[in-house]
Image: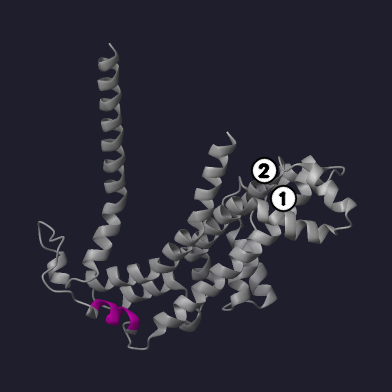
């Protein structure tokens, strides 16, 4: 019976591994297709069946993607715009969300729960509902076609406040009280004690905030008017509209536009791993 039980466990493990490998292949297949097709001529990409291994690496796709349809290399300026907007919004979201979450989690004041509920209520409102009022405000303030116009409406998010508040609500009050007794200021406590202990939540919020702004299309489409202020999604739209469809160049642009997200994810992933190991050890 013991052997039979061991055989049953082995079969279950094999099935689990097969399921995990299958899921990983399904998830990675579009990424592999994007990378392989970015170094192929368009004629080779359209072949059936698809040739996953190319006979000749066609780096011209990347050069053409950098030059753009008008040979102006505006792609470099557009990717810089996306980096500035996404990085600034990510930074402000982390700082403001952490400060607000810390206040809601560790400071007792009248109406605290009401304030938190109001934050959560804003998550129920689709962006499309407030998009036009936001646009009119930006127009009145004169921030059309500027970094401020792209950044100002997204300085923080209700989800960020919720995430940081939930992360800090279980943080021991005794540690904070001990720091106050030692004479530490609230700002010092926040920067030196609170922030280092919520790194996994900060990493999660950083990745989600950066990705949201990096992929944002609708708001820049409203606010941006000149080519020099366009972001990556707008550049891709412009490239598709002004030139003949070349699948190889489009895939090359997609690969280049994905690099910052990959860098951010792999940089922050160690905090997820350390958090998981810490939780497992603690358990």
Q: CA distance from mark 1 to mark 2?
A: 8 Å
Please give left or right for residue 3 compared with residue 119 in the image.
left
Which residue appears at 66% of the width and 78% of the height? 142
Q: Quadrant of residue 139?
A: bottom right
- Overall secondary structure of the magenta stretch? helix
Q: Quadrant of residue 91?
A: bottom right
| Residue 34 located within the stretch drawn in magenta | no
In the depicted structure, whether residue 90 falls above or below residue 25: below
Residue span colored magenta: 61-66
Label drawn at residue 166:
2
User: Which mark is first along the chain, 2 or 1?
Assistant: 1
Give me the residue at 36% from left, 71% from top: 256
User: Is residue 120 in view from this perspective?
Assistant: no
Label 1 packing within 10 angstroms: few (<14), some (14-19), many (20+): many
Is 118 placed left or right of 279 in the picture? Answer: right
Do we see residue 194 in this rendering? yes
Give 117 or 102, whichever is nearer the viewer. 102
Label 1 belongs to which residue? 101
């Amino acid at each position: 019976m013991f052997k039979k039980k061991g055989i049953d466990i082995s079969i279950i493990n094999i099935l689990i591994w097969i399921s995990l490998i299958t899921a990983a292949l399904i998830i990675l297949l579009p990424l592999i297709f994007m990378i392989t097709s970015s170094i192929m001529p368009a004629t080779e990409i359209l072949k059936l069946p698809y040739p996953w291994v190319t006979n000749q690496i066609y780096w011209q796709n990347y050069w053409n993607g950098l030059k753009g349809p008008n040979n102006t290399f505006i792609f470099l300026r557009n990717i810089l715009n996306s980096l500035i907007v996404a990085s600034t919004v990510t930074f402000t979201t982390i700082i403001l969300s952490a400060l607000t979450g810390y206040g809601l989690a560790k400071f007792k004041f009248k109406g605290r729960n009401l304030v938190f509920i109001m934050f959560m209520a804003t998550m129920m409102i689709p962006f499309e509902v407030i998009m036009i009022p936001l646009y009119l405000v930006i127009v009145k303030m004169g921030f059309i076609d500027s970094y401020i116009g792209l950044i100002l409406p997204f300085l923080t998010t209700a989800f960020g406040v919720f995430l940081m508040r939930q992360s800090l609500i279980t943080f021991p009050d005794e540690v904070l009280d001990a720091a106050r007794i030692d004479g530490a200021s609230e700002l010092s406590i926040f920067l030196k004690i609170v922030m280092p202990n919520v790194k996994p939540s900060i990493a999660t919020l950083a990745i989600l905030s950066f990705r949201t702004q990096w992929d944002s299309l609708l708001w820049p489409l409203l606010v941006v008017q000149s080519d020099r202020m366009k972001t990556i999604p707008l550049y891709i739209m412009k490239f598709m509209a002004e030139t003949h469809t070349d699948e190889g160049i489009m895939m090359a642009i997609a690969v280049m536009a994905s690099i910052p997200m990959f860098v951010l994810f792999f940089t922050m992933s160690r905090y997820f791993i350390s958090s998981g190991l810490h939780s497992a050890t603690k358990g």
